[in-house]
Image (spheres, rainbow, N blue to C red):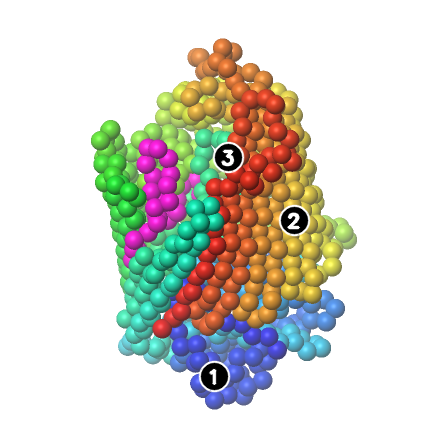
Amino acid sequence: MRASWLIMAFFSTNWGLANEEPGIQLDGRLDEALWEQATVYSHFVLTDPDTGAAAPYSTEARVLMRKEGIYLGFINSQPMNERVRVYSRKDEVPTADFNRVVIDFNGNGTSAYEFTASLGEGYSDGVYTQGNQFNSEWDGIWHFAVAEDKKHWSSEIFLPWSIAVYVIDPDAPVRNIGLSLGRVQKLRSEESSYPAMHWSEAGFINQLAKLEVTTQPEPEQLTVIPQVANHYDAEQQQWEHNIGMDFLYRPTSDQLLMATVNPDFGAVDSDELISNFSPVETLLAENRTFFTENHRLFDIKDNDEHFVLINTRRIGTLTNRNGELSGGLNFAGKYLNLGSSFDQGVLIAEDKDAGSSAGKRFYVGRTQWHSTFGELGWLGSLTDDSAQDRKAQLHAIDYHHYVDDLKLSANFMTTKIESQYHNKRGEGAFLSAEYALSDDANISSNLLWLKPDFDINDLGYMERNNIKQWRLASDVSFYDVTPQIREIFYEFSIERQQSFQSESLAVNYAFASLFSYQDTSLLELSLDVKTSGLDDLISFGHGSVHLPQQNEFYLEYIHPFGKGSEWSLVWGYLQEGLEHWAHSLEASVRHSWQDAFTVELSALALQSPDWLIGEGDGLLGHYERQFREIDLSLLWYIQPQHEMILRLQWNGLQANALSAFDTQNQSLVASNEPLESFAESDVSFQLKYQYQLAPLSFLTIAYTRQGAFFQLDDPLPNFSQQWEEAFRSVEESNVSLKLTYAL
């Protein structure tokens, strides 16, 4: 028998309830008499590959409603030699066999929550919105246990009613919730589901099975969670201490108030190490629990994240004209009130002051109306940056509608910026339609329209403005093609763009094919073509320039070996300059020992004789470059509630200057400006131990070290020297000790 407690920072329930009722024991075995009263589901069919055929091994799921929450149990028939038990971290795609549960607590298709429990004791959760848009950054508190015998392995899952915010009519004796049940077999790379719909299909959460609920949730709840953190800066040789507090108040099932005062996020996972020389900002994932919790009402973005209206990574960082400084967070609060037809939400936050610069203040309001005609919402935000005498406003209207196999979405947005330098207004819109031609084929189209003065970057994210973009995409799958190939997937897209100055930008074509073999190995081929045409971004705002066609071809092969292990190779043949071709090769391996220790290693090498980038001042630099990248991670599942994670990332760049160009009349013209060769290297290391003391309570110890190195002109250091210099040139080296305990 295996059992796990699941921890998250802001939800609370009485975690002893699983054992308070006689006959209910969460041990993974489903041998209590009360399970005989559960609703039973056994008609599981294959949804990946999406053939609809009967699953090769039987699955029986049971759902039991109790006053404290929902119990779900799975009995999975499977031979011993086909079971995979490798442990995986929270919210990573499980490497082991696992069961999946998706529940729409409101029963109206506006959102649904996913919970997965694996045979390797790993788990994950997340939230679906807008039909099938999944976000794994949501976390909830719930419990699971797994067990196995010679013929089956089984799982038990307990979801307290307090895990989500939802509407209940106190006068209605019965209400409906949505339900989807699934099972993934890793060695066979197959998923079977009830009902017969894969989670990736458009309108997924609108077509869940209906389940009647007669129980009522527990009364109001108040949780106070103090936290104490200590950080030792090895470079400055000084300690920093912090005491903070989190609050959660749930007066009714449809209301939630969350607050955090003087929080400390020093023990969160390090960001991905990114080398970005393009004019497009990298969108970083949010890894702070307060901002990921119950964020779905404020999570408005397009399908490909060209824009995100509320990017909470802007909060807690002070930005001024001299660059970006870590400012920290004074407090943040969030309030949700869901109704049968209207949902409302408020988010407020205040940054800490940095020296004489006052911290920013953020205000967000949200309301959404939902009915059989779809979902219609409004979002407004205000960012007040008094240090820069700048205020940024956003107003947005969004609409989503689902009709059988058709999904329609629309966003209309307006922004207003008031600052000491200028006042400006901008408008934007996004329209999208997705249609399932059949079970195996889909087509979609969208239009993005952002005017030059449209600007949401004070609290949101956008790749760019000044764009009219139209995209058409289609995909189709073929199953059981040959005795060796079980599925072939093809995808094609075309993207046409124009600026508001009537400049027709380069057209983008993309084609990809994915071959899934019976031995579960994968082969993917992709071709991206950017036609010759205007590029209005590469000069960093100094005018458009005509560039020749650029092509990218990638070939990737993934081959599993053993249980929970695989290796892969990715070969690239691409153009990133004016004419010549670059080569890249990335090799990766993931291997697990004793199901509790996993190592992942990837190495990338790129050789390019022709690299063209903007220098930021209107000058374009032409280089010959070499790039290397290494990413190593180790995960050790010491014992239940104890895990250790090590992550090492490094990259190095050598760029040998060839020539410089100015842009004149949308053409490249040789420049007399000097262009220097340069080398750049970054390294990031983190060792993190986490002990889950109890629900909502954990001890975290982490050591983080980051370094960076940059050098201009010849002779450039080799990659071994870059590694040494980056590791010696420490930008951050600290030890964090954090204790959080729920009272």
Circle 2 crowding by C-alpha within 10 Å: few under 14, some 14–19, many from 20: some
Q: Quadrant of the C terminus?
A: bottom left
Circle 1 crowding by C-alpha within 10 Å: few under 14, some 14–19, many from 20: few
**Can you tell which of label 1 and label 3 is closer to the viewer?**
3
Q: Where are the magenta residues, as a range?
A: 305-333
> Does residue 173 lie above or below 52 as drawn?
below
Quickly name the residue at label 3.
276
Alpha carbon separation for disc pair 1 and 3: 52 Å
> Does residue 365 lie above or below 617 as drawn?
below
Residue placed at 57% from the left, 57% from the top? 645
Q: Is residue 374 left or right of residue 605?
A: left
Magenta-drawn stretch contains 194: no
Quickly name the residue at label 2.
601
Q: Is residue 358 left or right of residue 23?
A: left
Q: Quadrant of the N terminus?
A: bottom right
* Residue type (three-letter) at the residue carrying disc 3: Asn
Please tell me whether mark 1 sits on a helix, a strand or a loop.
helix
| Front residue of this view, candidates 379 and 359 | 359
Q: Residue furthest right?
A: 483
Q: How many marks?
A: 3
First reached walking from the N terminus: tag 2 or tag 3: 3
Can the viewer see residue 47?
no
Magenta-drawn stretch contains 311: yes
* Residue type (three-letter) at the residue carrying disc 2: Leu
Q: Position of residue 30 (x, y in %)?
A: 57, 81
Instruction: Indicate which disc residue 19 carries.
Output: 1
- Residue 414's quadrant in the figure? top left
